[in-house]
Image: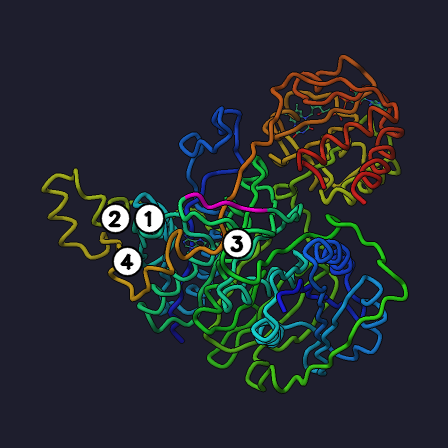
Amino acid sequence: MNNLFVYCELEDGIIADVSLELLTKGRSLANQLQCKLEAIAIGHQLDTIADQALPYGVDTLYLADDRRLAPYTTIPHAHILEQLFRETQPQIALMGATSIGRDLGPRVSSALHSGLTADCTSLEIGTHEDKKAGKVYDQLLYQIRPAFGGNIVATIINPECRPQMATVREGVMKKEIYDANWKGEVIHLKTSDYVKDEDFVVEILERHVEQSRINLKSAPILVSGGYGVGSKENFKLLFDLANVLGGEVGASRAAVDAGFCDHARQVGQTGVTVRPKLYIACGISGQIQHIAGMQESAIIIAINNDPNAPINNIADYVITGEVETIIPKMIQYYKKNTK
Amino acid sequence: MNLNILVLAKQVPDTRNVGKDAMTPEGTVNRSALPAIFNPEDLNALEQALQLKDRYPLSTVNVLTMGPFRAAEIVREALYRGADGGIVLSDRAFAGSDTLATSYALSSAIRKMGNIDIIFCGRQAIDGDTAQVGPQVAEKLGWKQITYAETIDQIDSEKIVIKRRIDKGVEHVSTSLPVLITVNGSAAECRPRNAKRVMKYKYARIPNELQNSNEDYISLYNSRDFLQIGEWCVRDIDCDLNELGLSGSPTKVKKVENVVFQAKESKTLSSSDSDIESLMIELIRQHTIG
Ligand SMILES: Cc1cc2nc3c(=O)[nH]c(=O)nc-3n(C[C@H](O)[C@H](O)[C@H](O)COP(=O)(O)OP(=O)(O)OC[C@H]3O[C@@H](n4cnc5c(N)ncnc54)[C@H](O)[C@@H]3O)c2cc1C
Ligand SMILES: Nc1ncnc2c1ncn2[C@@H]1O[C@H](COP(=O)(O)O)[C@@H](O)[C@H]1O
């Protein structure tokens, strides 16, 4: 009772990384709260799930196995969580901020009347004093997230309602096996007690992997390359950096004209106007037609081997040096300091 | 076929345009320094609704927005682009609502409207980026939901087939009406304003906007139904006051901290390992990356 719960998201019978990261975080929070770590996996053919999950320190693993429960659809998964949460009364419930977690979480929170905080970047345990009501709350979950377009960081709490629910994006928490020989209990739920035939109201006709169209405008982070990147091959470095940071790749016109990159990626007066949270200009001199399309970016990093490049005048960070050496280092030190 | 379609749209501060004066020295948000706009993905939602109306011209598209009186701008904007009407849900009792209390108020208003076949929402609002209100409304109504919709492939009285964009690709799903659909930013952009409609609806108002109007206008307003935008307060919807506003919101903001951006006084770094590592650490700390 009043334990910490993690919803394990499955993709082809494998627990998603984001869920394993949450199990790791959940284990350490559960130790701090001196409660148990519970987890649930919902899907079909779940024989290997226990071996995958238990080493992360799961005390109780619930499995709901039914052919109709995979792939994910909203209502059956939501009904299982709702009822299980009513039965087990967890104090905290965590799920990935994925297209599944963000579809499921609000549905469950609405049914249980519990607060949900999306996209947390940090989770901590702390106290809260409500001076007006003269109440002190111990051991609340601090749900910390950037708010307001990323310009402020807010700490959200749910003093009264349970479970305290939060979603977290992949890669924010660290995944670490707790104990390879950890013994936890596995409970097979009788799915017919939790879902009814009428719950299967959405049918998945087809699923396939498809690259999304390039959408520079809505990317929070843009890694843009100019003529100074030198070649199409070197542009791959930019794609690598954009990939690890969760951003997109943009380009100057000179880079597009030189054939380093697709026209759809051009930023500037005759390209797209962007206002990302972070703009990394690599080997771009900073002519006015380019600047016009990106000067409102919140933070600008200029990487250029010319210390007097005009782009440096509007940059928050000026790195003087070669694109080829700097980008791999950025990737390396980003990974080192987030994992 | 004639569909009764509702679009949930929110007026939001334009957080994409946050300039240097958007934060007060105390670290709070200076809302007045930010223009109020139609939440971008709610325009994608409106477009999906209007496309269904193009297909089935006897359909109606209404907009529901909850916010202060000035949110009537959202309904006017939707009228300019092709909507048939709208309602502004406004009351002090809604102030301080989190997503759960918002979804309670919206779902109470939707129940009062009745007879709706499809509700379109944006995927998320840029002031909170939560993407919660749509699914929470669907749950409160006991409806199905399809999130991240990109196109409607097929619709008839039996079923609707929707293409949705998920993390690793796309999914085509089918379900029956009624359904709540949240529309992704990758869906079709909203059509622009129509000049004739702008002429027609320029003076559309909610009752609360009439206060300083002259008599000529008032008599015009009273004689033309299409100028009258609906305005509902708590009394107009059947709801429990404890579920609204701060008291109906399980989540509380304990603390906000300004992420301080230096002015354009740039920091100069070399390409050395230590310089690059300290830059990455600083960006992670600021929550710019990570
Ligand atoms: C009507 C009109 C419209 C235009 N519209 C656009 C537009 O929409 N978008 C746009 O981008 N441009 C536009 N331009 C073109 C614009 O004027 C510039 O020519 C263009 O932006 C220059 O691109 P660049 O900075 O990549 O190239 P360059 O100006 O050649 O700069 C290359 C930079 O890379 C640096 N560099 C070289 N090697 C390295 C290395 N190994 N490591 C690090 N740095 C290195 C150099 O020091 C230099 O600063 C337009 C021009 C006109 C006339
Ligand atoms: N106050 C509101 N009035 C009308 N619709 C809203 C309101 N708040 C949220 N929505 C709808 O819910 C979606 C998701 O909002 P959010 O959960 O805040 O990200 C928005 O895109 C709107 O369609």
Q: Is residue B34 above or below residue B174?
A: above
Residue visible at 71% across and 32% down? B283
Image depth: mark 1 or mark 4 in front: 4
Q: Tell me the number on the disc at residue A299.
A: none
What is the secondary structure assignment of the residue under circle 1?
helix
How would you rate the neighbour count of disc 2 (Cα within 10 Å): few for under 14, some for 14-19, many for 20 or more? many
- Whole-number angstrom distance, CA of label 3 to CA of label 4: 25 Å
Judge whether residue A128 is colored magenta: yes
Q: Tell me the number on the disc at residue B76.
A: 1
- Whole-number angstrom distance, CA of label 3 to CA of label 1: 37 Å
Position of the C terminus of chain B by quadrant = top right
User: Looking at the picture, do discs 2 and 4 lie on one chain?
Assistant: yes
Q: Amino acid at mark 2?
A: Ala
What is the secondary structure assignment of the residue under circle 2?
loop
How would you rate the neighbour count of disc 1 (Cα within 10 Å): few for under 14, some for 14-19, many for 20 or more? many
- Whole-number angstrom distance, CA of label 1 to CA of label 4: 22 Å
Q: Do residues under tags 3 and 1 come within 8 Å of each other at their CB atoms?
A: no
Position of the N terminus of chain B by quadrant = bottom left
Upstream in the sequence, badge 2 or badge 4? Answer: 2
Q: Tell me the number on the disc at residue B204.
A: 2
Upstream in the sequence, badge 1 or badge 2? Answer: 1
Q: Tell me the number on the disc at residue A158.
A: 3
